[in-house]
Protein backbone atom coordinates (compact mmCIF):
# COMPACT_ATOMS: atom_id res chain seq x y z
CA UNK A 1 0.00 0.00 0.00
CA UNK A 2 1.31 3.42 -0.98
CA UNK A 3 2.38 5.66 1.94
CA UNK A 4 4.20 8.72 0.60
CA UNK A 5 6.43 9.96 -2.21
CA UNK A 6 8.92 12.65 -3.06
CA UNK A 7 11.12 13.84 -5.90
CA UNK A 8 14.04 16.20 -6.37
CA UNK A 9 15.89 17.48 -9.42
CA UNK A 10 19.25 19.23 -9.84
CA UNK A 11 20.65 20.75 -13.03
CA UNK A 12 23.83 22.43 -11.79
CA UNK A 13 26.48 19.69 -12.18
CA UNK A 14 26.16 18.66 -8.54
CA UNK A 15 27.93 15.65 -7.04
CA UNK A 16 25.06 14.90 -4.64
CA UNK A 17 21.26 15.08 -4.57
CA UNK A 18 19.28 14.98 -1.30
CA UNK A 19 15.57 14.28 -1.05
CA UNK A 20 13.68 15.01 2.19
CA UNK A 21 10.50 12.92 2.38
CA UNK A 22 7.38 14.54 3.90
CA UNK A 23 7.59 12.15 6.90
CA UNK A 24 10.10 9.59 8.26
CA UNK A 25 9.80 6.11 6.72
CA UNK A 26 7.52 3.87 8.81
CA UNK A 27 8.73 0.88 10.80
CA UNK A 28 9.32 -2.17 8.59
CA UNK A 29 8.37 -0.39 5.36
CA UNK A 30 10.13 -0.34 1.98
CA UNK A 31 11.39 2.44 -0.26
CA UNK A 32 11.47 2.03 -4.03
CA UNK A 33 12.10 4.49 -6.81
CA UNK A 34 14.32 5.48 -9.69
CA UNK A 35 17.19 7.74 -10.69
CA UNK A 36 17.00 9.59 -14.01
CA UNK A 37 20.03 11.45 -15.34
CA UNK A 38 21.71 13.22 -18.23
CA UNK A 39 22.37 10.66 -20.97
CA UNK A 40 25.96 11.96 -21.34
CA UNK A 41 26.84 10.93 -17.76
CA UNK A 42 28.76 7.63 -17.43
CA UNK A 43 30.16 7.78 -13.89
CA UNK A 44 29.30 6.00 -10.63
CA UNK A 45 26.32 6.46 -8.31
CA UNK A 46 25.56 5.37 -4.75
CA UNK A 47 22.64 6.09 -2.44
CA UNK A 48 22.13 6.10 1.33
CA UNK A 49 20.01 7.92 3.92
CA UNK A 50 20.41 9.83 7.18
CA UNK A 51 20.22 6.57 9.18
CA UNK A 52 22.84 4.66 7.17
CA UNK A 53 20.56 2.23 5.31
CA UNK A 54 21.86 0.60 2.12
CA UNK A 55 19.92 1.01 -1.14
CA UNK A 56 20.26 -1.40 -4.05
CA UNK A 57 20.61 0.08 -7.55
CA UNK A 58 19.26 -2.04 -10.38
CA UNK A 59 19.84 -1.90 -14.12
CA UNK A 60 19.95 -4.42 -16.94
CA UNK A 61 23.41 -5.59 -18.02
CA UNK A 62 24.28 -4.91 -21.66
CA UNK A 63 20.90 -3.30 -22.27
CA UNK A 64 22.26 0.00 -23.55
CA UNK A 65 19.89 1.80 -21.17
CA UNK A 66 22.03 4.30 -19.34
CA UNK A 67 19.50 6.92 -18.30
CA UNK A 68 17.45 5.21 -15.56
CA UNK A 69 18.23 3.05 -12.52
CA UNK A 70 15.94 1.31 -10.07
CA UNK A 71 16.31 2.03 -6.32
CA UNK A 72 15.11 -0.25 -3.52
CA UNK A 73 15.54 -0.76 0.24
CA UNK A 74 13.30 -2.83 2.50
CA UNK A 75 12.88 -3.79 6.14
CA UNK A 76 13.59 -0.23 7.30
CA UNK A 77 13.26 0.12 11.07
CA UNK A 78 15.12 3.34 11.98
CA UNK A 79 12.87 6.06 10.49
CA UNK A 80 15.06 7.78 7.87
CA UNK A 81 13.69 10.88 6.17
CA UNK A 82 16.55 12.24 4.02
CA UNK A 83 17.80 10.11 1.10
CA UNK A 84 21.03 11.19 -0.59
CA UNK A 85 22.39 10.22 -4.00
CA UNK A 86 26.15 10.63 -4.56
CA UNK A 87 27.41 11.11 -8.13
CA UNK A 88 31.02 10.80 -9.31
CA UNK A 89 31.82 12.73 -11.41
CA UNK A 90 29.03 15.30 -11.46
CA UNK A 91 26.10 15.03 -13.87
CA UNK A 92 24.47 17.98 -15.58
CA UNK A 93 20.95 16.74 -14.80
CA UNK A 94 19.76 14.27 -12.17
CA UNK A 95 16.27 13.48 -10.86
CA UNK A 96 15.50 11.19 -7.89
CA UNK A 97 11.96 9.78 -7.43
CA UNK A 98 11.13 7.83 -4.27
CA UNK A 99 7.98 6.08 -2.97
CA UNK A 100 7.33 4.35 0.38
CA UNK A 101 5.14 1.23 0.61
CA UNK A 102 3.73 -0.94 3.39
CA UNK A 103 3.37 -3.69 4.53
CA UNK A 104 6.70 -5.25 3.62
CA UNK A 105 7.74 -5.92 7.20
CA UNK A 106 10.99 -7.84 7.63
CA UNK A 107 11.86 -7.98 3.92
CA UNK A 108 15.34 -6.58 3.27
CA UNK A 109 14.75 -7.02 -0.47
CA UNK A 110 11.21 -5.80 -1.18
CA UNK A 111 11.33 -6.56 -4.93
CA UNK A 112 9.55 -9.60 -6.30
CA UNK A 113 10.55 -8.65 -9.84
CA UNK A 114 11.83 -5.59 -11.73
CA UNK A 115 11.94 -4.74 -15.44
CA UNK A 116 13.87 -1.81 -16.95
CA UNK A 117 13.32 -0.84 -20.58
CA UNK A 118 13.30 1.93 -23.19
CA UNK A 119 10.96 2.50 -26.13
CA UNK A 120 10.02 5.09 -28.73
CA UNK A 121 6.58 6.64 -28.18
CA UNK A 122 4.22 8.77 -30.26
CA UNK A 123 2.24 11.71 -28.90
CA UNK A 124 -1.32 10.68 -28.02
CA UNK A 125 -0.72 6.95 -28.54
CA UNK A 126 -0.80 4.80 -25.36
CA UNK A 127 2.26 2.67 -24.63
CA UNK A 128 2.84 -0.12 -22.11
CA UNK A 129 5.41 -0.34 -19.32
CA UNK A 130 6.01 -3.97 -18.38
CA UNK A 131 4.89 -6.64 -18.01
CA UNK A 132 6.39 -7.51 -14.64
CA UNK A 133 5.66 -10.83 -12.94
CA UNK A 134 4.07 -11.35 -9.52
CA UNK A 135 4.53 -14.53 -7.49
CA UNK A 136 1.93 -14.07 -4.76
CA UNK A 137 -1.65 -12.84 -4.39
CA UNK A 138 -2.21 -9.23 -3.44
CA UNK A 139 0.85 -7.16 -4.37
CA UNK A 140 1.74 -3.60 -5.34
CA UNK A 141 3.06 -2.92 -8.85
CA UNK A 142 4.77 0.46 -9.38
CA UNK A 143 6.02 1.99 -12.63
CA UNK A 144 8.36 4.97 -12.99
CA UNK A 145 9.02 6.48 -16.41
CA UNK A 146 10.44 9.56 -18.09
CA UNK A 147 10.12 10.93 -21.63
CA UNK A 148 13.23 12.47 -23.15
CA UNK A 149 10.92 14.19 -25.62
CA UNK A 150 9.35 16.20 -22.79
CA UNK A 151 5.69 16.70 -21.96
CA UNK A 152 3.50 14.66 -19.65
CA UNK A 153 2.86 10.92 -19.23
CA UNK A 154 -0.69 10.09 -18.10
CA UNK A 155 -1.55 6.59 -16.79
CA UNK A 156 -4.59 5.20 -18.61
CA UNK A 157 -4.91 1.54 -17.52
CA UNK A 158 -7.93 0.54 -15.41
CA UNK A 159 -7.28 0.48 -11.63
CA UNK A 160 -4.05 2.47 -12.06
CA UNK A 161 -3.50 5.62 -10.03
CA UNK A 162 -0.92 8.30 -10.67
CA UNK A 163 1.05 8.97 -7.51
CA UNK A 164 -0.13 12.47 -6.69
CA UNK A 165 3.09 13.55 -4.94
CA UNK A 166 5.01 13.02 -8.18
CA UNK A 167 3.38 15.31 -10.72
CA UNK A 168 6.45 16.49 -12.65
CA UNK A 169 6.25 16.67 -16.41
CA UNK A 170 8.59 14.17 -18.15
CA UNK A 171 8.79 11.95 -15.04
CA UNK A 172 5.89 10.15 -13.38
CA UNK A 173 5.04 7.22 -11.09
CA UNK A 174 1.84 5.17 -11.07
CA UNK A 175 0.75 2.02 -9.26
CA UNK A 176 -1.85 -0.72 -9.08
CA UNK A 177 -2.79 -3.54 -6.68
CA UNK A 178 -2.89 -7.11 -7.94
CA UNK A 179 -5.29 -9.86 -6.88
CA UNK A 180 -3.54 -13.00 -8.17
CA UNK A 181 -0.12 -14.14 -9.42
CA UNK A 182 0.54 -13.23 -13.05
CA UNK A 183 2.04 -10.60 -15.35
CA UNK A 184 1.03 -6.96 -14.99
CA UNK A 185 1.62 -3.82 -17.04
CA UNK A 186 0.78 -0.13 -16.71
CA UNK A 187 -0.20 1.97 -19.71
CA UNK A 188 0.59 5.66 -20.22
CA UNK A 189 -0.31 8.21 -22.87
CA UNK A 190 2.48 10.67 -23.77
CA UNK A 191 1.70 14.28 -24.66
CA UNK A 192 4.82 14.44 -26.83
CA UNK A 193 6.76 11.98 -28.98
CA UNK A 194 10.17 10.82 -27.78
CA UNK A 195 12.03 7.99 -26.06
CA UNK A 196 10.64 6.71 -22.75
CA UNK A 197 12.87 5.09 -20.13
CA UNK A 198 11.00 3.05 -17.52
CA UNK A 199 11.39 0.80 -14.50
CA UNK A 200 8.50 -1.28 -13.14
CA UNK A 201 8.50 -3.22 -9.85
CA UNK A 202 6.34 -5.84 -8.22
CA UNK A 203 6.74 -5.75 -4.43
CA UNK A 204 6.83 -8.87 -2.32
CA UNK A 205 3.97 -8.99 0.19
CA UNK A 206 4.87 -8.58 3.83
CA UNK A 207 2.88 -8.53 7.02
CA UNK A 208 2.48 -7.02 10.43
CA UNK A 209 1.10 -9.03 13.33
CA UNK A 210 -2.46 -7.88 13.92
CA UNK A 211 -3.87 -10.95 15.69
CA UNK A 212 -3.94 -11.88 19.35
CA UNK A 213 -0.96 -13.69 20.83
CA UNK A 214 -2.24 -16.01 23.53
CA UNK A 215 0.09 -17.36 26.19
CA UNK A 216 -1.47 -20.16 28.20
CA UNK A 217 -0.01 -21.36 31.48
CA UNK A 218 0.37 -20.47 35.13
CA UNK A 219 1.30 -17.20 36.75
CA UNK A 220 1.05 -14.82 33.77
CA UNK A 221 -1.65 -13.08 31.69
CA UNK A 222 -3.74 -15.22 29.38
CA UNK A 223 -3.79 -12.78 26.46
CA UNK A 224 -1.28 -10.30 25.05
CA UNK A 225 -1.83 -7.96 22.14
CA UNK A 226 1.04 -7.32 19.72
CA UNK A 227 0.11 -4.92 16.92
CA UNK A 228 2.09 -3.05 14.27
CA UNK A 229 5.48 -4.24 15.43
CA UNK A 230 5.08 -3.24 19.07
CA UNK A 231 6.70 -5.66 21.49
CA UNK A 232 5.02 -7.36 24.41
CA UNK A 233 7.07 -8.75 27.29
CA UNK A 234 5.98 -11.46 29.73
CA UNK A 235 7.95 -12.67 32.74
CA UNK A 236 7.08 -16.20 33.77
CA UNK A 237 8.47 -19.60 34.61
CA UNK A 238 7.30 -22.99 33.47
CA UNK A 239 5.97 -24.27 30.16
CA UNK A 240 3.65 -22.35 27.86
CA UNK A 241 1.87 -22.76 24.53
CA UNK A 242 2.03 -19.95 21.96
CA UNK A 243 -0.94 -19.72 19.63
CA UNK A 244 -1.23 -17.31 16.67
CA UNK A 245 -4.79 -16.70 15.53
CA UNK A 246 -5.41 -15.75 11.90
CA UNK A 247 -1.80 -14.89 11.10
CA UNK A 248 -0.01 -16.15 8.00
CA UNK A 249 3.47 -15.58 6.62
CA UNK A 250 6.78 -15.32 8.41
CA UNK A 251 6.74 -14.71 12.16
CA UNK A 252 9.61 -13.22 14.15
CA UNK A 253 9.79 -13.55 17.94
CA UNK A 254 12.43 -11.63 19.91
Image (tube, rainbow, N blue to C red):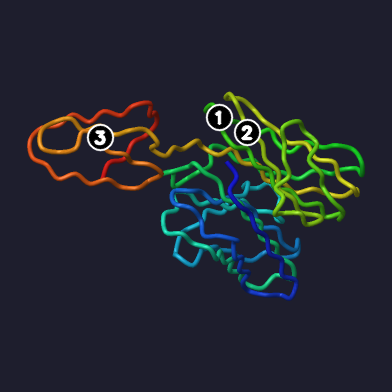
Per the image, the residue denoted by label 2 is 177
Q: Which mark is residue 223?
A: 3
Say above or below: 199 vs 157.
Answer: below
Q: Which one is in front, 92 or 209?
A: 209
Residue at 56% across, 33% down: 139
Q: Which one is in front, 133 or 4?
A: 4
Q: Which mark is residue 104?
A: none
**Is the residue marked by circle 2 packed among few (<14), some (14-19), or many (20+) residues within 10 Å?**
some
Mark 2 secondary-structure assignment: strand
* CA separation in Å, label 2 and label 3: 34 Å
**Is the residue marked by circle 3 packed among few (<14), some (14-19), or many (20+) residues within 10 Å?**
few
* CA separation in Å, label 3 and label 1: 30 Å
Q: Quadrant of residue 224?
A: top left
Mark 1 secondary-structure assignment: loop
Residue 121 appears left or right of 211: right
Q: Earlier in the sequence, mark 3 or mark 1?
A: 1
- Kindly check if marks 1 and 2 are in contact, taking CB atoms under 8 A apart as contact: yes
Q: Earlier in the sequence, mark 1 or mark 2?
A: 1
Residue 152 in the image, given as x and y percentages of width and height: 84, 51
Residue at 55% across, 66% down: 82
Per the image, the residue denoted by label 1 is 138
Amino acid sequence: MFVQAGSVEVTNNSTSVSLVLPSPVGYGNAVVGCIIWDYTFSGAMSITDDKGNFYTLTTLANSGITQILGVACGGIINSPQTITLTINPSAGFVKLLICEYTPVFGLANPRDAVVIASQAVTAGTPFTVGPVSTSYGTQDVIAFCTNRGGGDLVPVSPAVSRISNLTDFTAVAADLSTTAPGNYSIQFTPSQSGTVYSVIYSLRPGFQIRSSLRVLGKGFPSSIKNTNGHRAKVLFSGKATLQFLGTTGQVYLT
